[in-house]
Amino acid sequence: MIDVLFLPEPVSQQHVCVVVDVLRATSTIVTALANGARCVVPVRTIAEAKKRKAENILICGERKGIKPKGFDLGNSPIEYFTVKDKEVILTTTNGTRAISMINSQKLYAACFLNLHAVIEQLRNHDHVTIVCSGQKGKIAYEDVLCAGAIVYELNDKLTDGARISRELWKQSRRKDLSKLLFESQHAQELAEYGFSSDITFCSQTDLYSIVPVFVEDRFIKQAP
Ligand code: MLT
């Protein structure tokens, strides 16, 4: 059975969850790990992130889209090309909040950048819940679209949430993904803040073949 939650809610299950925040937290997590970061540790608050600052540890993230004062990096995935061997502490408005609500046997992070790597990983599992991070408590189009792209390729029983997201992907999948993402509400806000290049970057499908998996308190690269 595959389920899609359009908004995060507490999930505590014996099975597998996938968190999606296309713009931009899971795109950032995937990019950091693909570029050699040792791990990405999601934390809820700016204060928590600051407490963990140390050598070889980068404190990163955003509030209202912008890098908080004293942080090393913001939440633009394109800032994460030179993080080799670093530990990344990440706090964001929606994505890390969604992650903190999930307490499942396995948790993966997905976005368009690692779409098919995640799909392949999920073929080994029977019960999957995809959790869309949303934006400020509202449904985010780009997350549901990405969830639909995952569901579309998995042959399994679907909940209504999974069917709705698959239908969205079915009618959109031949269109220009970057154009679709640019039309989303969140993308329009990010563009206003000057982050248009992030949207273009996040709309690349299968740029990376890694799958972040959550172990204890951090995402690491799933062993191939
Ligand atoms: C979040 O997790 O809230 C988002 O990634 C926000 C953003 O686009 O920076």
Image: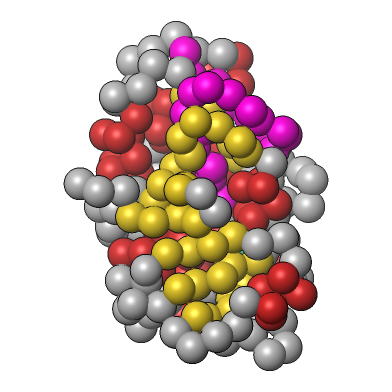
Query: How many marks are shown on the rendered structure?
Result: 0
Relative vertical location of residue 207 with respect to residue 138 in this rendering, above or below: below
As for residue 160 lying within the magenta part, the answer is no
Majority secondary structure of magenta residues? strand
Q: Is residue 148 visible?
A: no
Q: In the image as oriented, which residue stretches furthest toward the left?
A: 224
Residue 113, image quadrant: bottom left
**Viewer-closest of 19 and 143:** 19
Magenta segment boundaries in residue numbering: 1-22
Q: Position of residue 128 (x, y in %)?
A: 47, 24
Relative vertical location of residue 31 with respect to residue 72 in this rendering, above or below: above
Q: Position of residue 175 (x, y in %)?
A: 40, 44
> For the point 28% across and 43% down, which residue is it?
117
> For the point 36% across and 64% down, which residue is it?
33
Residue 19, image quadrant: top right
Q: Is residue 121 visible?
A: yes
Q: Position of residue 77 (x, y in %)?
A: 47, 70
Relative vertical location of residue 13 with respect to residue 61 in this rendering, above or below: above
> For the point 29% across and 53% down, which residue is it?
210
**Viewer-closest of 114 and 35:** 35
Q: Position of residue 198 (x, y in %)?
A: 50, 70
